[in-house]
Amino acid sequence: MSDAASAQLETFLQRVPYVRFLGMQAELAGDEMTAILPFAPHLVGNTYLQALHGGVIGAFLEVTALAQLSVAQPSARVHKTIDITIEYLRPGRALTSYARADLRKVGRRIANVHVEAWQDDRSQPFAALRGHFLLSGDG
Amino acid sequence: MAEVPPIVREMAQNMTTSVPQAIALGLRFVSVSPARGSLEVPWREDLVGDPDTGVIAGGVVNSLLDHTCGLACAAAAGTEPFSTATLDLRIDYMRPAAPRAGVVAEAHCYKITRTVAFVRAEAWDADRSDLIATAQAAFVVNRPRPDSAS
């Protein structure tokens, strides 16, 4: 399970050009994934505060949900986002960001996923996402 | 189309040339008018989210919509200095963009108070009547305190 899951995750991260554009990585502990986004200058949305762009934060959370789904629901094709709501709790500072996805419900076609992101303190999340995803059915 | 003050137009145009993430994505300024703004992102190989089809990533559309909503806030806030922070952003993805297609977004700040701005946005690839995504966002508006202005 763990080897297959990590191969699935590695494939997802390597195959998607936009994941490389972000510079996003991930680590697996069993079937739980931690997504990692090292800080990089091209991710900044506010140079005055050196804060991450809101769109980058949303994208990081969305890709985290998709990556966790690729581990839980292996498929040759990428699952598709239906809708997402992103809540911004604090500025994303010029630090490495982490995120974990919670698959609240995985049905036959639709999954409901919550994601939370933090930086240096796990108990102080800076952003969260709730979303629905359409599962590719060829797994 | 109604005009915005020159200082607002200048700031709007700077939003694609001075923000690192906007530069990295290759965002382009399209237009600005009172409480409205439009930006586009041309397709690029490294922005693809689905390698099987060459469709641009949802994350790119996310940044484009967020940035265009910020532009609409700027176009609604008048000429006094202010900054914004996103409170929440909801995006509905109606369909994927066409393979190898760029995306255009337009946002409308339909209500702004001293402290909060409410914005809707739409994104499409080729045809405005066939949307790929819609967004609804709320922003905190930080303006200088009245007592510190005098």
Image (cartoon, coloured by chain):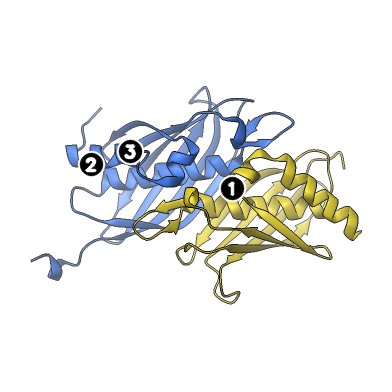
Front disc: 2 or 1: 1
For the point 61% across and 47% down, which residue is it?
Answer: A83
Which chain's colour is yellow?
A
Task: State the SS at label 1.
Answer: helix
Which residue type carries mark 3? Answer: Arg
Circle on res. B8: 2
For the point 47% across and 53% down, which residue is it?
Answer: A54
Q: Position of residue A126 (x, y in %)?
A: 52, 66
Q: Which chain carries label 1?
A: A
Q: Position of residue B75 (x, y in %)?
A: 28, 43
Q: In this view, does B32 lie to the left or right of A20?
A: left
Residue at mark 2 to residue at mark 1: CA–CA distance: 30 Å
Circle on res. B106: none
Front disc: 2 or 3: 2
Which chain's colour is blue?
B
Which residue type carries mark 2? Answer: Val
Dot 2 and dot 3 residues touching (CB under 8 Å): no
Which residue type carries mark 1? Answer: Leu
Front disc: 3 or 1: 1
Which residue is situated farthest in the top direction here?
B126
Residue occupied by mark 3: B36
Q: Nearer the viewer, residue B131 or A117?
A: A117
